[in-house]
Image: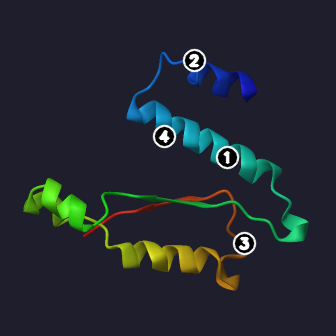
Amino acid sequence: MLAFLTYLESGRHNSAATRNCRLVAIHRFFAYVADHPHGIWVNAVAPQLLDTPVNRATFPAEVMAHAVAPEAIADVIAFLVSDAAAPVSGAILPAYGA
């Protein structure tokens, strides 16, 4: 795991896909070593484009029609920290817009 992360940090791979792979690898590592008996779970939310004022000013309306509202992301996070999500660990939940 450490060798893989070191390779990715070498500077030769700086694309968005590589950064996302790094985040997924780090997430999976922490999910693997999480201390479940003590109530530590590791999950992540991977939102698509967020509906923010800056993004609305940057992207065309047809792209923003599929953006995710920040409230929707908050709802996903609220679920993950609730007792209902107790059996969920190691998940990367994608959050797509309409």
Residue underneath mark 3: 87
Q: Earlier in the sequence, mark 1 or mark 2?
A: 2
> Badge 2: how crowded within 10 Å, few (<14), some, or many (20+)?
few
Q: Earlier in the sequence, mark 1 or mark 3?
A: 1
Q: Earlier in the sequence, mark 2 or mark 3?
A: 2
Quadrant in which the C terminus is drawn: bottom left
Residue underneath mark 1: 28
| Mark 2 residue type | Ser
Residue underneath mark 4: 20
Q: CA distance from mark 1 to mark 3?
A: 16 Å
| Mark 3 residue type | Pro
Left or right of 90, for residue 20: left
Q: Quadrant of residue 56?
A: bottom left
Q: CA distance from mark 3 to mark 4?
A: 25 Å
Which numbered circle lies on residue 10? 2
- Most extreme residue toward the bottom is 83
Q: CA distance from mark 1 to mark 4?
A: 12 Å
Q: Earlier in the sequence, mark 3 or mark 4?
A: 4
Q: CA distance from mark 1 to mark 2?
A: 21 Å
| Whether label 1 touches label 3, CB < 8 Å | no
| Whether label 1 touches label 4, CB < 8 Å | no
Left or right of 5, for residue 35: right
- Most extreme residue toward the left is 61
At x 64%, y 48%, the residue is 27
Q: Earlier in the sequence, mark 1 or mark 4?
A: 4
> Badge 1: how crowded within 10 Å, few (<14), some, or many (20+)?
some
Left or right of 88, for residue 49: left
